[in-house]
Amino acid sequence: MRIRPSRSVGLLAAAALAVAGLGAGSGCGSTQVAGDGPQVAGGSPEALAQRARQVAAAWDGSTAAAAWRSGYHPMGEVVQPPRGGLLSQADKQAYRQRSLVLGDELPTTGPHDGRVTWARGKSLTRPLTRPEEAYQALVGARAEGKPYLTVTGAKLGEMSVVTSRGPAMVPAWLFSLEGYDSPLKQAAVVPSELPRSPIERARGIPGYPLRHLVRIAADGLSVTVVALRRVCDHGPAVEVLETPGSVVLSASVKPRKDGGTCTKQGKLQEVTVKLDRSLGDRILLDAHTGRPVPYKPSLGPSPSWS
């Protein structure tokens, strides 16, 4: 087990936003983290490295890890646009804004359960959403005069989804769209319940928890996450600890050398971290929270941890 800085960290995108609780009026060198849980002594980089080792040790071989690996936990898009993409800028805008209208009735009957299938014959039976539930999960608030997509029907099919256990074929609702030959797909499978973490959230270590997972590379050799930093910092840094059973990411910030006063303004940035070997079925963990890094679908919220 060893901890090291990521070999390649790319800042791919940034979005400025107001983030409460970042310590208005505090010096830029302050990197304390608020939250419940045990205090990690120090606040130095070594304290963060120590925390990563603690998280890996708590999860590796735990019942929580076994539950994670035996369940269905999506870590890739559960909504896929029509094959070939959207036909116009107006349709792309409608898709991004979840602006859909129902042009016909949806099925009212269907199976209650479906089977998720992985490679080598591994499978799991899970409850399925109803067509109306799946449709409502896709739809946002549509403003008058804005472009929209018209749903003309739905039938049960399947789609490929990246999960915590690798790619899987899952039952999906195939929504037909007016003007398109191929459907908009929405995974119909209800994800498994998230296991309770075997380690509590930490306090007093540098940096902030990761916001969410963006993507895992097809070869599993890199992951892209969203990290938080204050506007006066030089940017986020993500270190990685790889073990046979887990990959622990530790996000910290690069403070300004001249110190000064920070405001509550913060930035979210995508950071790509390279791994020594493919992620595979190893658990991707956040050193700060002690929990798996949540995946946030582009058309839905991140999973919440109790």
Image (cartoon, helix red, strand yellow):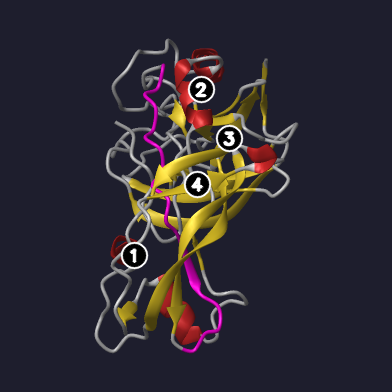
Q: Earlier in the sequence, mark 1 or mark 2?
A: 2
Disc 3 and disc 4: Cα gap in Å?
36 Å
- On the picture, is 4 further left or further right than 168? right
Percent x, y of residue 217: 67, 48
Q: Residue sitting at 28 percent across and 39 percent down?
A: 24
Disc 4 and disc 1: Cα gap in Å?
17 Å
What are the residue bounds of the magenta stretch?
179-198
Q: Nearer the viewer, mark 3 or mark 2?
A: 2
Percent x, y of residue 179: 49, 89
Q: Nearer the viewer, mark 3 or mark 4?
A: 4
Secondary structure at numbered mark 4: strand
Q: Nearer the viewer, mark 3 or mark 1?
A: 1
Secondary structure at numbered mark 1: helix
Q: Please state which amino acid type lies under the numbered disc 2.
A: Ala
Residue designated by label 4: 115
Residue designated by label 1: 131
Q: Residues within 10 Å of mark 2 (few under 14, many from 20)?
A: few
